[in-house]
Amino acid sequence: MYFEFSNKYRELSIWILVFILLLSLPIRFYFLEKNQFDTAIEKSVSISERSKDLLARRGKILDRDGIILAEDIPSYEIGLEIKNFSFNPDEINKISFVLEIDEKKLRNRLANQNRKYLILKHSASVDEYESIIKENIQGIVGYKKYKRNYPKGMAFSQIVGVVNTYTNSGIQGIELSLDSMLSGTKGVKEYTTSRKNKTIASDIKEPLHGKNISLTIDSDLQTNAYLILEDTVKLHEANSGSLVVIDPKTREILAMANYPSFDPNNRKNISLGTLENKAATNLFEPGSTVKPIIMAVILDNDNTLLNKQINTSPGYIDYQGFVTKDFRDYGVQNVSQIISNSSNVGMVKICDKVNSELIVNGFYKMGFGKYFNEIFISTREGYLPNVNTLSDREKVSLCYGYGLQTTLLELVNSYSILYSKGKSVPLKLVTNSPSDEFDQILSPEVSSNMENILTSVVDLGTGRRAKVNGIDVSGKTGTVRKVGSKGYEEEALNALFIGKASMRDKDLIIGLIIRNAKTNGSGGGEVAAPSFSKFINKITESEKAL
């Protein structure tokens, strides 16, 4: 009896358990339907993990006052998905017209039957994108991106530089030298989607935008420098010109302009010649502009020379079989007169008594043949000869500017030492650059004496046409024969003026070179000095207008 009762109880328990399990199934299905059914079904059908790049903006390049010189603006890559395109002649014509693409070239590109996707325009403007979308052409697609814009255009293009149109990375100028700071790091959005293209989950890593860079450049000075160069090059039918402006107190570069230049926003007709920042890369023999520099080095070694009289008659000298001439017979001259009259004979006679090591090392201390720093990646250091192989004739030639090479930027930097009580401080092109300790290259006394001599060059000597009414001007002219395939060319000249203008609230050191002037003069006194004067007048007029 007990055994039968026990079996019945066990059987009943099993049936109760089965009943509970059967009852739980519809409840479970109901729960899934209400909360997780869609997700579970979608996961069981198809899951796709995707990622999308989030664009990073390149940093802006600004002038010293925050004016934008380079910036990223919205742009589109406009393309054509070939499988969806009709090849209708009217639509091909519309694409050609709206996107300004040569229709014949477009048809040739479309003739490639193996192509799945055709890029029509890499960096189209927002207006172009909206215009082509309005045409409702099947197959047209657009992908948002950034493109570089240069609001100040040609006057700034060689110093600011440009970026690669496709990658938006720097390839010239500041865009290249500070590319790592300007470049951002793209972000990424990772997400999971169903076959119905419904996002199930996502994870976002935000982009890091590039840093803004503020240059020491003054936009007004830069623009006026470019305009003066343009006028001067055209007036004298010259090949090109460059102008550099430095603040002698801070050693900040306030302007560095070249003409001709190029439009950084439209590079269809760009050439390597106009892409180059000639003020910082074009090497030349500096001629008479180095006479004050090497004379200061010699005086710093022996200041008694300052009052010595040097006989330069009869206006030429045969030194070891090589004849060096002056413009005319200046007779007996002191150091100031030798610099003021730019006497080659006087320089030969003085440098003949000086050892080669003092001269070559002196040029080096004054900044020649030195690489500036990584910010000036688009620059070249000058050339100095090896002192151990230097002949006496080559030594004296250095003293009137032949046998060495420099750039305009390097030459102006050397003058900044003369005009700063003999102190050498690194040039700055980026604001808030660390101020390095200075090196005392020349004694303040020698530096002051040389500045007085350079004032006499403008008052009485070869630089008279650099004068500006109401402004103290000093400086030195230079007229240098250029080297051709057959040696020095008599007709091909570089015209130079390097000097300082002491204005109401600031001093400016300005260097100017005009290459191969062909009409209305050709030398430093005829071409470069008047342009220096015009530049000073132009910037003072601009300041009065403010």
Image (spheres, grey):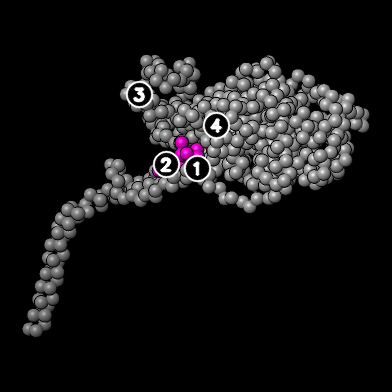
| Residue assigned mark 1 | 213
Q: Closer to the N terminus: mark 2 or mark 1?
A: 2
Residue 131 disc label = 3
Question: Where does residue 292 sit, x and y in percent of width and height?
Answer: 74, 36
Residue 312 percent across, percent down from the top left: 86, 29
* Residue 59 sits inside the magenta stretch: yes
- Residue holding disc 2: 55
Mark 3 and mark 4 in contact? Answer it, CB < 8 Å. Answer: no
Q: Identify the mark nearer the N-term, 1 or 3.
A: 3
Give the class, few, some or many, for how many residues have Cα within 10 Å of label 2's Cα (few <14, many ≥20). some
* Cα–Cα gap, marks 2 and 3: 23 Å
Front: mark 2 or 1? 1
Q: What's the CA distance linking mark 4 and mark 2? A: 33 Å
Contact? badges 1 and 3 (CB < 8 Å): no
- Marked residue nearer the N-terminal end (1 or 4): 1
Q: CA distance from mark 3 to mark 4?
A: 37 Å
Is disc 2 placed on a helix, strand or loop? loop
- Residue toward you, 213 or 179: 213
